[in-house]
């Protein structure tokens, strides 16, 4: 039996990248939930989440509390990994390759180089080819998505505006990427060189997208998705999986629901988690999305993205 | 009986797209199955990789578990990774519900996490030389019953003894790896042959 570097850091024959995008394939058509504790990760798994994102504060709390947002503590990540049978993801700051090295050494299944955390580098993202652990990165447009893929991202998620419960920017970014992909497919070969310049992306990737009519890695959606109908909307717009951050475990005033000691609040979180999972599967059946919506107890109040000052936006982080 | 078999791909979540494309390339008519009533029209079914806990959650609804249970007891079914887990007689790490129709025991996430995912090439009983196998957070088959034929094996590693990776029990086929993620079409072709034999005995 011959080992084809599937486990190594080399990407010379593409085996590493195939394993990375392979895991992303397995996550398609599902919901990935932000969790801040073992109790929350158990609720997520029981509700049918395909993966959990382990973090110390969900975006709504980071937004409310301010300060520097960093990688979660290894202790918390390890506890959540020990309690989960589904893949566990964790976030590193943009450009903070040392945080990413720590996450890889902990054995997380996916690293999110995320604008939700405070960026560590204002010019460079992490060289993701240097890792065996796959990466997901946010993007607002095709050029940004392809730059991240060039750096080694195995999954793209549209950014939206995290921690708001307002889906408007998730919609805007998904529509933008889908529109730009469609536009590439009708260009002639000689026009693709200019398209690469316009998008600020490598020509080979631009050409690949033009031929295939889709990104070379799975395209998921994040940032402001809070209800079953939001999930249905994003799936209909072309998302292949849904990330839900603050929408499940938060109540008024950026405070988490008490899912350990308060049965009512636990029931609320469970109802939201189950409903989003159901609506994501049956996104094209309004009757089932209605049934899911009806089953939801309470909701995140949310923060209109339009009311956020430019300097407080998270989506503009990343280059 | 139609010339082109009608094969469903369970699309609750996971790698359903790549399986459907592969089957269509090999001449099958395919349907993505998200509701139990869709099973009625099918000659056979593929249960893809994904998260078996998520599959089970979705199957709880609308009588889907019972309908799928009836299907896997009578029609050709091919399970990869999570699909293999659902077909198995016994599941460990942790124990969970399964259809129990394929006489094997399976250990979930047996090789560790994503960093232990690997692409291996090994000999196979299929004609045409060694087979490339893509393992992603793979399960391990820890026991096979007497009626189960082993078609490929993963050699012993630091993660434990050698174990079967591709097994057949009559009209049931199961793999712990992902043949849909390689260019090699032999495993899907074998399933199509099983389906054709079952529908044209």
Image: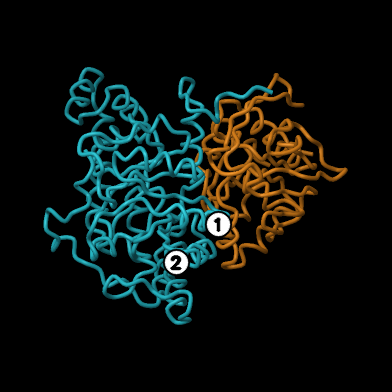
Q: Residue B76: x and y, percent?
A: 71, 45
Give above or below for A108 relative to A267: above
- With A270 as the anchor, is A233 left or right in this view? left
User: Which residue has dot 2 on it?
Assistant: A273
Residue neighbourhood size for the residue with mark 1, other residues' Cα within 10 Å, grouped as few (<14), some (14–19), many (≥20):
some
Note the chain letter of the cyan one.
A
Q: Which quadrant of the rendered structure holds the N terminus of chain A?
A: top right
In percent of the image, x 39 and y 68: which residue is there? A249
In percent of the image, x 67 and y 53: which residue is there? B86
The mark nearer the N terminus, 1 or 2, is 1
Q: How many marks?
A: 2
Q: Secondary structure at mark 1?
A: loop
User: Which residue has dot 1 on it?
Assistant: A84
Q: Residue A41: x and y, percent?
A: 49, 62
Mark 1 vs mark 2: in front: 1
Between residue B50 and residue A46, name the one nearer to us. Answer: A46
Q: Residue B160: x and y, percent?
A: 73, 38
Q: Is residue B39 visible?
A: yes
Q: Which quadrant of the rendered structure holds the C terminus of chain A?
A: top left
Q: How is the image coloured?
A: by chain
Which label was assigned to residue A61?
Answer: none
Whether discs 1 and 2 lie on one chain: the answer is yes
Q: CA distance from mark 1 to mark 2?
A: 16 Å
Note the chain letter of the orange one.
B
Q: Is residue B6 visible?
A: no
Between residue B166 and residue B74, name the one nearer to us. Answer: B166
Q: Secondary structure at mark 2?
A: helix
Give above or below for A196 relative to A32: above
Disc 2 sits on a residue from what chain?
A
Q: Residue B54: x and y, percent?
A: 55, 57
In percent of the image, x 56 and y 56: which residue is there? A82
Question: Which quadrant of the view contains residue A59?
Answer: bottom left
């Amino acid at each position: 039996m011959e080992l084809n570097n599937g486990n190594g850091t080399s990407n010379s024959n593409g085996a590493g990248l195939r394993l990375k995008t392979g895991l992303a394939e397995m996550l398609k058509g599902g919901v990935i939930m932000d969790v801040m504790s073992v109790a929350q990760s158990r609720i997520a798994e029981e509700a049918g989440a395909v993966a959990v994102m382990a973090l110390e504060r969900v975006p709504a709390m980071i937004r409310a509390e301010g300060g520097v947002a960093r990688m979660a503590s290894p202790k918390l990540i390890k506890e959540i990994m020990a309690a989960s049978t589904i893949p566990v993801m964790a976030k590193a700051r943009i450009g903070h390759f040392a945080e990413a090295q720590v996450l890889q050494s902990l054995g997380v299944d996916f690293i999110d180089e995320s604008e939700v955390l405070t960026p560590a580098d204002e010019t460079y993202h992490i060289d993701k080819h240097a890792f065996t652990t796959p990466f997901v990165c946010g993007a607002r447009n095709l050029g940004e998505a392809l730059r991240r893929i060039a750096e080694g991202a195995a999954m793209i998620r549209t950014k939206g505006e995290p921690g708001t419960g307002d889906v408007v920017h998730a919609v805007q970014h998904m529509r933008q990427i889908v529109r730009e992909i469609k536009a590439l497919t009708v260009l002639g070969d000689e026009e693709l060189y200019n398209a690469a310049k316009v998008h600020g992306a490598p020509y080979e990737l631009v050409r690949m997208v033009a031929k295939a009519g889709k990104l070379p890695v799975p395209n998921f959606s994040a940032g402001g998705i809070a209800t079953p109908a939001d999930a249905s909307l994003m799936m209909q717009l072309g998302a292949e999986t849904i990330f839900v951050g603050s929408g499940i475990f938060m109540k008024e005033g950026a405070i988490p629901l008490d899912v350990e000691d308060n049965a009512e609040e636990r029931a609320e979180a469970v109802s939201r988690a189950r409903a989003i999972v159901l609506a994501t599967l049956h996104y094209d059946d309004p009757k089932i999305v209605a049934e899911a919506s009806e089953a939801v107890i309470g909701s995140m109040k949310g923060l209109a993205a339009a009311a956020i000052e430019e300097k407080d936006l998270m989506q503009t982080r990343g280059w | 009986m139609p010339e082109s078999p009608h094969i469903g791909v369970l699309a609750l979540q996971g790698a359903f797209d790549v399986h459907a494309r592969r089957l269509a390339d090999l001449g099958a008519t395919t349907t993505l199955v998200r509701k139990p009533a869709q099973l009625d029209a099918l000659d056979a079914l593929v249960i893809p990789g994904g998260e078996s806990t998520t599959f089970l959650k979705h199957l709880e609804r609308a009588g889907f578990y019972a309908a799928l249970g009836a299907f896997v007891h009578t029609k050709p079914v091919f399970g990869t990774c999570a699909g293999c887990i659902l077909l198995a007689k016994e599941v460990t790490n942790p124990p969970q519900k399964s259809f129990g129709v394929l006489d094997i025991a399976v250990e979930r996430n047996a090789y560790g996490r994503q960093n232990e995912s690997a692409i291996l090439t090994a000999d196979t009983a299929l004609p045409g030389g060694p087979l490339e196998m893509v393992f992603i957070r793979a399960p391990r088959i820890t026991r096979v019953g007497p009626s189960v034929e082993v078609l490929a094996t993963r050699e012993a590693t630091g993660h434990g003894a050698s174990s079967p990776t591709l097994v057949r029990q009559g009209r049931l086929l199961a793999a712990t790896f992902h043949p849909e993620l390689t260019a090699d079409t032999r495993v899907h072709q074998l399933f199509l042959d099983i389906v054709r034999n079952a529908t044209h005995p």
